């Protein structure tokens, strides 16, 4: 059962060739069997999942099902879930039980999806390898000595290992697409504001966007349909009608021009990845697409701009974690004055990478540095957006590698934050410009998956998903399973 | 040495919205601690602020009334600092892009002097919670009911030159926000409070002296007293050859002195940056026009009209425009009576305000309507009753005894003006006081007053005093 895509399972459920209870038990069994080695879940909510599955089966029987009714999913532990621990991968929230559901959680539950549990992640979504989690590293299902990518590493590994049919994630600088690429699955980051951020613990508010980790683009379309749309509780959510993405993915292939940025293939790109990406582009040509060379001249500025803007917002967003109202409070917190109260709670509640970014962010916002860093980064952001806008005047979609290298070894980059940050060089641009982008599997290097990134213009998800879907109809990279989890 | 005090005020007016500026929680005052703080006010993980459109409208009204420029685009920023009563670790405020820029208020200093105080800006922000340091055995209590309450911070230029001017300005802003119905202005409940920036300089000097900021002054009296004592402190330092430290100070009303706040709170770098959770506030011109059209008559305009149309003195006009309700009452009264505007003004300022003050009532709770008071004045005007009797009738009306004419009828208070009845009374009084009659005839004219009084007394106050006067003179000179 687990080898089927979400779309296939949806059809099977509605044909009643399988029940949600059976499906849910099957995935719970797989989690019990495999996750000790993977560490992709922080919390498994078996009881709740079985209750939701039973309710889904009744709903299907009553003829009141949506495409997602009865589908077992996992949520990244950054989404608040009522009555269930929402840790954000941090000791700071190890004891935090959210009193409410995030909009994404609420909408998927309303559609009838079953929540299997909450997945592991880099602490407060800060990381590209899932090594900063308080709950330990997550292993790549293709090679346990490698990272699955991050920050949505738990979601990516769980979907890749078929421990759930799909999972939610969040993408601030590549946190959905990069782990999708490294784990060999499909990861979609929608247009900024397409999905409500309400109940999604904020990292960098102007960049954060909820996304999907699925086997296929078609599955992503089904999930996005249920997740997207205006939410009065998020002022930055977009007031734009939600298209029927899943109806659109299979529609006829029309003339598509794919822009290929020359400078995405400069030094720093792994040779094996370059080969796989060129092969994928060749596949698109065979499908009738036109390739066009373009330049995104300011892409080299995206990492430095990102590492000013994101930490700046994070330093402020994470101020609420002070041990006063919720979250970690040190045993000796009350010994000493107010300052020492904060220092003890935050000193022990946050991990090293989170502290590094809070310090960086605090620094770039300080009097005397604000103009040189924060304002300058905002200008760069504008330049990068303009580059994309110029490109989309000529091309429908931009294609290139999702990451410069395949999955790296656990511990390989933890001592070198800059090397780690450069892993997001191709993904950050879409966040800075607020554009939709996805990563689909397109090959392997030494047994490790390679991701092809497609970036579209504002709200072009229907077209983006369709272009990805047609590739997946023509290839089978997305169907490959990590041997240990077949 | 002659010194001049220079003052600028930052006034925080709580906007009269039912819910908070970024959440749906109630702003009602006086609820048990932490019962009016929702997840947004508590700064829970994942929650987001959503701007209360009503708060924006109220701020626009202020901007229009204060002759400021309402920004078509303004931006919320985060002011970052740690304190237990600031749940998110930042306060959402407006920094370099406020909703109102510039403007001015004309402040009536006395009957003959109006001072124009320029405004720098007015911006929207959320209030913080409250820290309670007593009653918790060495710990502090936090009440977050106030957290997220909408405030309009009104910042003036350093245009005031004395504590009294600052007090007058603060009263003028208080009157204005209440006229506009954008704040209840309740100072006991903290809905209206201010910080004062105070410096002194030698008279004639252009350059401003080093200023100190006096925080959290919550009454007109404290503002004036705090500024006075702070200016005196600064002058003493400067005259002693010292320098003023730029710092934040608190006024202690019990000791009537100012003291520096702890240095640590001084050193804050608030790291302002635009709040990415909120879109820029975009206001369209049509909305501004609609709000402008719906503005009530403003205090300064009303004052001018009362002086021009009703020929009132500046003093009378000031008193009658001190609140919108009082001015409206007076307008209605003038409209409904045949009495002169001056007579109406005297009655409002005398009997009516007296009765209201006696019972601690607002004008809206007056127990006599303008129309009812108007008919009372009509009876004075047409000579049915004397002014003195009218005061008794006013009291009777106030206590709900009925309409003017009913009371006159029931109590038999109608003024006696017919000559025959009055002559009979005069004859009676003259016969009873031969000594005074003789004194008058010997040239002591002031005795007349006594005799008039006796006739009034004999008539139980109902005699028409002018008539009595006339008849008495005639009788005495006969």
Image (cartoon, rainbow, N blue to C red):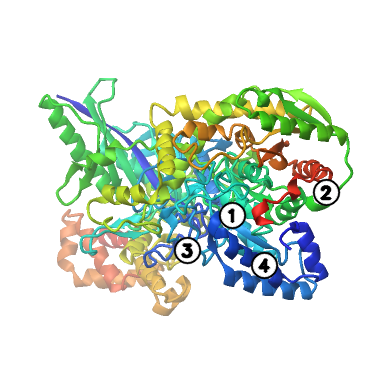
Q: Which residue is mark 4?
A: A26
Q: Residue A426: horizontal and vertical position, in percent?
A: 63, 32
View extreme (bottom): residue: B410
* Mark-to-mark CA distance, 4 and 3: 27 Å
View extreme (left): residue: B240
Q: Chain of mark 4?
A: A
- Along the line of sight, which residue is nearer the eye, A19 or B212? A19
Q: Residue A412: horizontal and vertical position, in percent?
A: 50, 37
CB under 8 Å between discs 2 and 1 = no
CB under 8 Å between discs 2 and 3 = no
Q: Are marks 1 and 4 on the same chain?
A: yes
- In the rendering, which numbered label is found on residue A248? 2
CB under 8 Å between discs 4 and 3 = no
Q: Is residue B427 above or below residue B257?
A: below
Q: Which residue is mark 1?
A: A233
* The quadrant where residue A258 appears: top right
């Amino acid at each position: 059962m687990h080898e089927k895509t979400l779309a296939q399972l949806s059809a099977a459920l509605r044909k009643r060739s399988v029940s949600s209870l059976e499906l849910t038990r099957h995935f719970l069994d797989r989690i019990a069997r495999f996750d000790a080695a993977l560490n992709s879940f922080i919390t498994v909510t078996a009881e709740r999942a079985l209750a939701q599955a039973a309710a889904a089966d009744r709903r299907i029987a009553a003829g009141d099902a949506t495409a997602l009714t009865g589908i077992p999913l996992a949520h990244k532990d950054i989404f608040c879930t009522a009555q269930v621990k929402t840790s954000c991968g941090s000791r700071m929230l190890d004891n935090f039980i959210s009193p409410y559901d995030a909009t994404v959680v609420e909408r998927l539950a309303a559609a009838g999806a079953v929540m299997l549990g909450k997945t592991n992640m880099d602490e407060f979504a800060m990381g590209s390898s899932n090594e900063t989690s308080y709950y330990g590293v997550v292993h790549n299902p293709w090679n346990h000595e490698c990272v699955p990518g991050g920050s949505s590493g738990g979601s990516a590994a769980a979907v890749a290992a078929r421990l759930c049919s799909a999972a939610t994630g969040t993408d601030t600088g590549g946190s959905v697409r990069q782990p999708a690429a490294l784990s060999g699955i499909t990861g979609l980051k929608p247009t900024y504001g397409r999905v409500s951020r309400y109940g999604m613990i904020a990292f960098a508010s102007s960049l954060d966007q909820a996304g999907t980790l699925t086997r296929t683009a078609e599955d992503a379309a089904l999930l996005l349909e249920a997740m997207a749309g205006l939410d009065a509780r998020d002022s930055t959510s977009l007031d734009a009608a939600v298209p029927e993405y899943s109806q659109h993915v299979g529609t006829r292939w029309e003339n598509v021009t794919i822009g290929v940025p020359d400078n995405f293939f400069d030094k720093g790109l792994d040779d094996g990845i370059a080969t796989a990406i060129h092969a994928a582009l060749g596949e698109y040509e065979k499908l009738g697409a036109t390739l066009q060379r373009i330049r995104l001249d300011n892409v080299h500025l995206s990492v430095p701009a990102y590492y000013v803007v994101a930490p700046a917002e994070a330093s402020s967003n994470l101020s609420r974690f002070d041990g006063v109202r919720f979250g970690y409070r040190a045993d000796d917190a009350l010994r000493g004055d107010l300052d020492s109260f904060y220092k003890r709670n935050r000193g022990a509640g946050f991990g090293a990478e989170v502290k590094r970014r809070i310090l960086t962010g605090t620094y770039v916002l300080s009097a005397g540095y604000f103009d040189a860093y924060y304002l300058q980064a905002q200008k760069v952001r504008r330049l990068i957006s303009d580059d994309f806008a110029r490109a989309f005047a000529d091309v429908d979609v931009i294609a290139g590698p999702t990451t410069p290298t395949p999955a790296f070894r656990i511990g390989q980059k933890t001592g070198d934050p800059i090397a780690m940050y450069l892993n997001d060089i191709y993904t950050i641009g879409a966040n800075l410009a607020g554009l939709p982008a996805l990563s689909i599997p397109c090959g392997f290097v030494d047994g490790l998956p390679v991701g092809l990134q497609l970036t579209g213009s504002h709200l072009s998800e229907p077209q983006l998903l369709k272009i990805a879907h047609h590739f997946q109809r023509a290839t089978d990279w997305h169907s490959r399973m990590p041997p240990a989890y077949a | 040495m002659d010194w001049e005090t220079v003052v600028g005020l930052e006034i925080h007016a709580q906007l009269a919205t039912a819910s908070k500026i970024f959440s749906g929680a109630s702003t009602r005052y006086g609820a048990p601690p932490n019962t009016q703080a929702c997840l947004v006010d508590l700064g829970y993980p994942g929650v987001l602020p959503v701007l209360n459109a009503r708060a924006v409208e109220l701020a626009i009204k202020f901007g229009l009334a204060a002759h400021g420029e309402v920004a078509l685009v303004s931006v919320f920023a985060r002011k970052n600092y740690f304190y237990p009563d600031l749940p998110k670790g930042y306060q959402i405020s407006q920094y370099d892009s406020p909703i109102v820029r510039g403007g001015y208020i004309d402040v009536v200093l006395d009957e003959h002097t109006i001072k124009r105080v320029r405004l720098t800006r007015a911006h929207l922000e959320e209030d913080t919670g409250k820290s309670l340091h007593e009653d918790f055995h060495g710990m502090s209590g936090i009440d977050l009911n106030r957290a997220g309450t909408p405030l309009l911070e009104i910042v003036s230029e350093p245009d005031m030159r004395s504590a009294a001017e600052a007090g007058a300005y603060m009263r003028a802003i208080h009157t204005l926000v209440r006229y506009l119905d954008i704040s209840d202005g309740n100072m006991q409940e903290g809905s209206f409070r201010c910080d004062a920036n105070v410096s002194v300089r030698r008279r004639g000097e252009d350059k401003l002296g080093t200023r100190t900021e006096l925080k959290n002054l919550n009454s007109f009296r404290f503002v004036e007293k705090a500024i006075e004592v702070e200016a005196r402190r600064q002058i003493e330092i400067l005259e002693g050859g010292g320098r003023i430290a730029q710092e934040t100070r608190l006024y202690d009303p019990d000791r009537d002195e100012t003291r520096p706040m702890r240095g640590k709170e001084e050193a804050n770098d608030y790291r302002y940056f635009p709040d990415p959770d909120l879109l820029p506030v975009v206001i369209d011109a049509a909305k501004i026009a609609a709000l402008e059209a719906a503005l009530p008559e403003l205090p300064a305009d009303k004052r001018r009209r009362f002086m021009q149309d009703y020929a009132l003195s500046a003093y009378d006009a000031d008193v009658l425009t001190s609140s919108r309700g009082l001015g409206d009452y007076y307008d209605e009264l003038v409209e409904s009576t045949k009495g002169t505007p001056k007579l109406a003004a005297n009655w409002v300022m005398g009997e009516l305000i007296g009765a209201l003050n006696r019972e601690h009532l607002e004008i809206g709770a007056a127990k006599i309507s303008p129309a009812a008071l108007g008919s009372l004045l009509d009876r004075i005007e047409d000579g049915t009753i004397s002014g003195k009797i009218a005061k008794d009738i006013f009291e009777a009306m106030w206590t709900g005894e009925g309409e003017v004419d009913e009371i006159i009828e029931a109590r038999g208070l109608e003024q006696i003006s017919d000559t025959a009845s009055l002559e009979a009374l005069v004859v009676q009084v003259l016969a009873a006081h031969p000594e005074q009659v003789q004194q008058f005839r010997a040239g002591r004219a002031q005795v007349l007053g006594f005799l008039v009084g006796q006739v009034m007394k004999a008539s139980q106050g109902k005699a028409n005093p002018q008539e009595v006067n006339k008849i008495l003179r005639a009788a005495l000179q006969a």
